Image: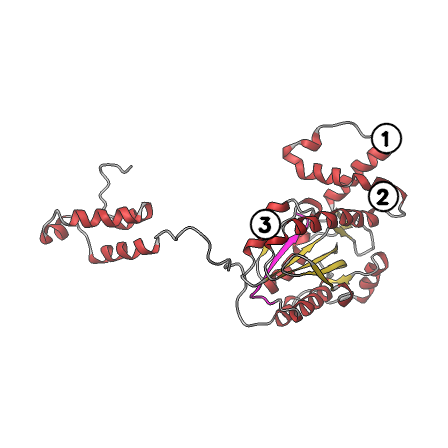
Amino acid sequence: TMSSSFNPLRHPENLFFIQPDLALRTVCVTLSLFSPSSLFDNMKITIASLAALFVATEAFHTAPIGRTSTRINMIVKGDEKASEKVAKVFEGKPAENSEFDALVKANFPGAISNKQLATKVVSVLEGKGYTPGNTLLATSLCADELARVLEDDFVKVYGNNFNLGGLSGFPFAGNTGFGAMAAHVPDDGYCLLVHGPHVGITKDGLIGKVERPGIALVDNCCGSAIAASNYLKGITDGGAKITTKLQSFSDFQQGAVQELILPFGRRLNDCEDRMKELPYALYDSQDILVRDIINTGAGGIKKGLALLGGIQINTGPDTLDYFHPLRFDLYDENGKVVDDLLPLIV
């Protein structure tokens, strides 16, 4: 309802934002009430205002209900190949350090730098028809800003990311999030889904810690995973107290992480290095969940989906991050795994 002092003909450009069809009818009816001379002298209407109004009613016209295409603006356009894009991603980033590379691989056999990972993954998928213009990137990685490094590397190749993850990298978006993501994949296009927990390693080889830019303190990484591990250790050691915090909405993701790690109590207690084993235990839990979510939403897959899973290994600001690939599966349009691509990148 508009105020009686509102004059639609004095400011017609405002009315079409409220209801374009009403704006058009209002102007036409009001014009019929005035003579041509008094209309423009007294109401101060300009030809430009009327023209803007008529154009705007078309611009704000409501589209018919129903989606005719799932192509979206978040997909990167252009003719540049993915392999050409990935070569530019690491320009200006730290060079590979052979001494630190050996340190990382001694602690995480099978790990490769993010540069090697992105280059190999993009090359393999390019051969399967995945391009920057037809591929939607989706990730289930930790909320930690260090997890954005790997994500950003792939974003610069394929475009903006659909986030499925939360604390520790668990796929908290679930079936609903996956269904929404699948609907955003370009028609006759693909999805690259990257997931996994993360762990830090310092330049001195301390696992579970990492140097962060601008922070003097060597910080925990992953903080959520370590907190869950400490909770679990309290249970297995017999010192944990019963609490309702697991069901608290204000921290429900961490509560879920702590519940999902419970089956790995003996495994973590019996291992030689708890911080080294922790991300692999988390990955095993997440791998089951992610594949179950994909199977549940298989009907929404367009032309295909590539699932890349593993452990993110975050390092200090002066060295490249690493990734230990543990799964690289190719799904067809029916949601069936048709190829194991892992041997092509490790």
The Cα atoms of the two marked residues, 2 and 3, are separated by: 34 Å
Looking at the rendered image, the quarter that the N terminus falls into is top left
Q: Can residue 217 be seen from the camera position used here?
A: no
Query: Is the residue 6 above or below the residue 51 in the image?
Result: above
What range is drawn magenta here? Answer: 131-143
Q: Looking at the picture, which amino acid does disc 2 mark? A: Leu
Marks 1 and 3, the one that precedes in the sequence: 3
**Of residues 144 and 186, which is closer to you in this image?**
186
Looking at the rendered image, the quarter that the C terminus falls into is bottom right
**Labels in figure, total:** 3
Quadrant for residue 224, please give it: top right
Marks 2 and 3, the one that precedes in the sequence: 3
Q: Residue at label 1?
A: 238
Front disc: 2 or 3 = 3
Q: Residue at x 54, y 72 (%)?
A: 79
Instruction: Give percent across and percent down for residue 219.
Output: 74, 47
Q: Residue at label 2?
A: 268
Q: Residue at label 3?
A: 179
Circle 1 crowding by C-alpha within 10 Å: few under 14, some 14–19, many from 20: few
Marks 1 and 2, the one that precedes in the sequence: 1
Q: Looking at the picture, which amino acid does disc 3 mark? A: Gly
**Of residues 334 and 308, which is closer to you in this image?**
334
Label 3's element?
helix
Q: Residue at x 28, y 49 (%)?
A: 21
The Cα atoms of the two marked residues, 1 and 2, are separated by: 15 Å
Q: Are marks 1 and 2 in contact (CB under 8 Å)?
A: no
Q: Can residue 126 be seen from the camera position used here?
A: yes
Front disc: 1 or 3 = 3
Q: Residue at x 84, y 40 (%)?
A: 265
